[in-house]
Amino acid sequence: MTISSLAKQLREAMHVVVFTGAGASAESGIPTFRDALTGLWERFNPAQLATPEAFRADPSLCWGWYEWRRQKVGQAQPNGAHLAIAELAKHVPRLTVVTQNVDDLHERAGSQGVIHLHGRLNSPRCIDCGHSYQLQESLEDLPEEGSRIEPPRCRACDGYVRPGIVWFGEMLPEDAWRAGLEAAEECDVFLSIGTSGIVYPAAELPLRALGHGATVVHINTVRFDVSSQEHFLQGPASARMKSLLQEAFGDIPAL
Ligand code: OAD
């Protein structure tokens, strides 16, 4: 599909879903998980950092790693892709942003009602009683990679507060998953941006959208195989989103 026919579909759509992965935040300097050399899972072992067992075995190592990531996000700025997604909401009757990202860059770019399938770095909870907490946005120094930081204790039960992230083997937050699924099954255009699409159940969303007749477009720096009914725009998320929006809605000064 050419960019102009895709732009036409975007102009005519009643409901657009934008589904993002780590690649959407890459241009803000936030590392992805699986990119060669720079991906977090290329350099760190998820078994030591991204399971409830890992947290119980070494809470300070685990908490320190998420604090390092959280502070990196705190120092980053939304990039052109986040801004274009927030801008798109002004041009279509309905836009739903569903993200696998645990940062708050969509919100800081101006997107509202973002569905976080994999939790949020700023919203940890007690590992024992589930009491939830909100961490402050503004942070001091970036801790060293691999620093140990003792997690805070829960005010209600004195258990350790754990990162509010969905770890391997855990269920997605039920409300977020249901809302993501409903949006995917209801939309006319589904833009999947900067995700390797290999982590389920999140990766099911483009398939659900396709199954319900939506136009599904993948935007990624690296081309991968998609079915003949899906579309691919290869390149960085910020540049591809900007050209798509300009093609669909004319010059947008904010981008
Ligand atoms: P991945 O690291 O698996 O994939 C990132 C994708 O972004 C890759 O396909 C890259 O080619 C692409 N990419 C990189 N830079 C880009 C750019 N500037 N523009 C467009 N695309 C770019 O990250 P996710 O798919 O998000 O889970 O990974 C899914 C889940 O796996 C994450 O949510 C995380 C991880 O384990 C949890 O934290 C629960």
Image (cartoon, grey):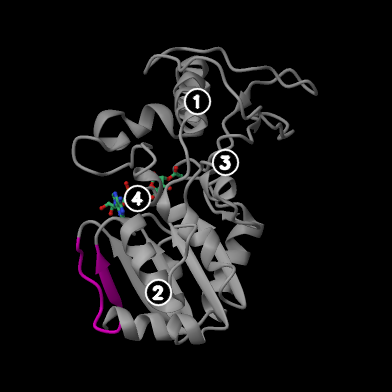
Decide which of tag 4 and tag 1 comes sooner along the chain.
Answer: 4
Q: Residue at x 34, y 44 (%)?
A: 27
Q: Nearer the viewer, mark 2 or mark 1?
A: 1
The residues tagged by marks 1 and 3 sit, at their Cα atoms, a distance apart of 13 Å
Amino acid at the residue labelled 2: Leu
Per the image, the residue denoted by label 1 is: 71
Per the image, the residue denoted by label 3 is: 120
* Residue 253 picture location, percent across and down: 48, 61
Q: Is residue 216 above or below residue 199?
A: below
Residue at mark 4: C-beta within 8 A of ligand 1: yes
Q: Quadrant of residue 234?
A: bottom left
Decide which of tag 1 and tag 3 comes sooner along the chain.
Answer: 1
Decide which of tag 2 and tag 1 comes sooner along the chain.
Answer: 1
Q: Judging from the image, what secondary structure is the residue with disc 2 in?
A: helix
* Residue 232 picture location, percent across and down: 27, 72
Q: From this viewpoint, is residue 194 visible?
A: no
Per the image, the residue denoted by label 2 is: 207
Q: Residue at x 63, y 32 (%)?
A: 124
Estimate how packed mark 4 is, as few (under 14), some (14 to 19) or many (20 or more) residues with alpha carbons within 10 Å. many
Could you tell me which quadrant the C terminus lies in? Answer: bottom left
Q: Judging from the image, what secondary structure is the residue with disc 1 in?
A: helix
